């Protein structure tokens, strides 16, 4: 997951470099008179890495636009906290200052996607980000007791 502008710029540059590298590799393989299937087999791992990196770049761009994925039953809360920080344009250093902790703590928490975070701590992060998170509860209709 891309967590800041520096990582984003590096990823965009790597994408451009990889695209060029794939094209060069393809040309070299074709000069060796390999069959299209053989060329594809050689290039597939490079293309797979390229697609994964492209997906990460696109995900970061969606976060910057404020587009978030839904979380269910608090699964994905850590990822959401990181996404909210990115969307709000707040650096890890700024968040650390707002929380009164060292920047390395925020970096460590984000690297671990806030695994094992308490609800109180999540609420403090949300407050520091200036975010109001709301939830809904849905109970399957067949599980609701009907009062007569």
Image (cartoon, rainbow, N blue to C red):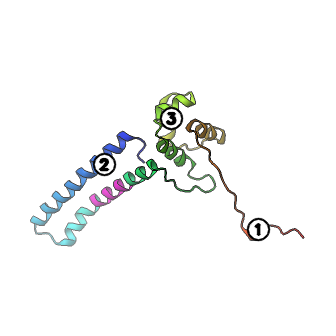
Look at the image and give the residue range highlighted in magenta: 46-55
Q: Which SS type dominates the magenta stretch?
A: helix
The reply to whether discs 1 and 2 touch (Cβ–Cβ < 8 Å) is: no
Horizontal arrangement in the rendering, residue 28 relative to residue 76 (left or right): left
Few, some or many residues within 10 Å of mark 1 (<14, 14–19, 20+): few
Q: CA distance from mark 2 to mark 3?
A: 24 Å
Residue labelled with disc 1: 143
Distance of mark 1 from mark 2, alpha carbons? 49 Å
Secondary structure under tag 2 reads helix
Quadrant for the C terminus in the image: bottom right
Image location (x, y in percent) of residue 19: 23, 56
Crowding at dot 2, Cα within 10 Å, few <14 / some 14-19 / many 20+, comes out as some
* Residue sitting at x 62%, y 44%: 132
- Taking the spot 51% from the left edge, 53% from the top edge, the residue there is 68
1 or 2: mark nearer the eye? 2
- Of mark 3 and mark 1, the one earlier in the sequence is 3
Depth order, front residue of 93/110: 93
Q: Which residue is mark 3?
A: 106
What SS does tag 3 mark? helix
Given residues 139 and 133, the one toward you in this image is 133
x, y percent for residue 127: 61, 37
Q: Position of residue 80 (x, y in %)?
A: 54, 48
Q: Which mark is residue 12?
A: 2
Secondary structure of the residue carrying numbered label 1 = helix
């Amino acid at each position: 997951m891309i967590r800041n502008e520096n990582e984003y710029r590096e990823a965009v540059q790597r994408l451009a470099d990889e695209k060029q590298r794939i094209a060069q590799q393809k040309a070299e393989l074709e000069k060796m008179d390999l069959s299209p299937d053989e060329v594809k087999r050689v290039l597939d791992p490079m293309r797979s890495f390229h697609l994964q990196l492209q997906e990460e770049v696109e995900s970061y761009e969606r976060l910057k636009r404020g587009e978030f994925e839904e979380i269910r039953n608090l699964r994905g809360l850590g990822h959401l906290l990181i996404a909210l920080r990115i969307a709000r344009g707040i650096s890890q250093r700024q968040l650390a200052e707002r929380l009164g902790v060292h920047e390395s703590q925020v970096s460590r928490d984000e690297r671990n996607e806030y695994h094992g975070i308490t609800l109180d701590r999540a609420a403090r992060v949300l407050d520091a980000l200036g975010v109001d998170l709301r939830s809904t509860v849905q109970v399957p209709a067949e599980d609701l007791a009907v009062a007569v």
